[in-house]
Image (cartoon, helix red, strand yellow):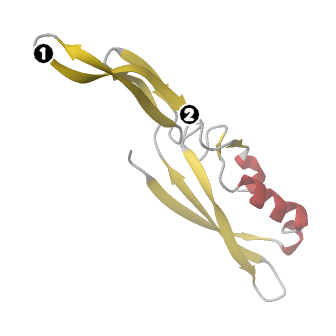
Amino acid sequence: MPVYNFSETHIFDNADVDTAYKSALFQLTGTVNDATFRECAAGECLFLGASGSKRGTGDWEITFRFSASPNKTAINIDGMEVDKKGWEYLWVYYEDQLDETANIMVKKPIGVYVEKVYDDGDFGGLGL
């Protein structure tokens, strides 16, 4: 699946980068957006984390890293259709079946599954 990586650097007042804010960044790292964020539909944007430092005795410069993967709808696998959000994992269960025309055993998909990999997060907590 295609992936788009991007980062943003923002300046924050010293008073805004407190323990609660740092904890929010920690808790949101490794989550996907639960609502539209930066033109990405819910489930498409993964927050990879933030890094930064205090600039002298003043404000903070923080860089936020993201990775985006598009949601897909109506994925058709041998007549079975599923929808998959960008960071979900799709897998197919196959069973051996006899192809009577060729008289050989072939793998036939009998189940298509979509698994949630990352928890959803409210990216409003990033303060962007």
N-terminal of the pair, mark 2 or mark 1, is: 1
Whether residue 62 is visible to the viewer of this picture, yes or no, is no
Q: Which of the 4 image quadrants contains residue 44?
A: top right
Q: Label 2 crowding class (10 Å Cα cut-off): few <14, some 14-19, many 20+?
A: few
Q: Position of residue 75 (x, y in %)?
A: 38, 25
Image quadrant in which the N terminus is located:
top left
Report the residue at 82% width, 83% height from top: 58
Q: Which of the 4 image quadrants contains residue 22?
A: bottom right
Q: The residue tagged with tag 2: helix, strand or loop? A: strand
Seen in the image, is 87 located left or right of residue 104? right
Q: Is residue 52 above or below residue 118?
A: below
Q: Amino acid at mark 1?
A: Asn
Q: Amino acid at mark 2?
A: Glu
Total marks placed: 2
**Viewer-side residue, 106 vs 61:** 106
Residue receiving disc 1: 103
Cα distance between the residues tagged 2 and 1: 35 Å
Residue receiving disc 2: 115
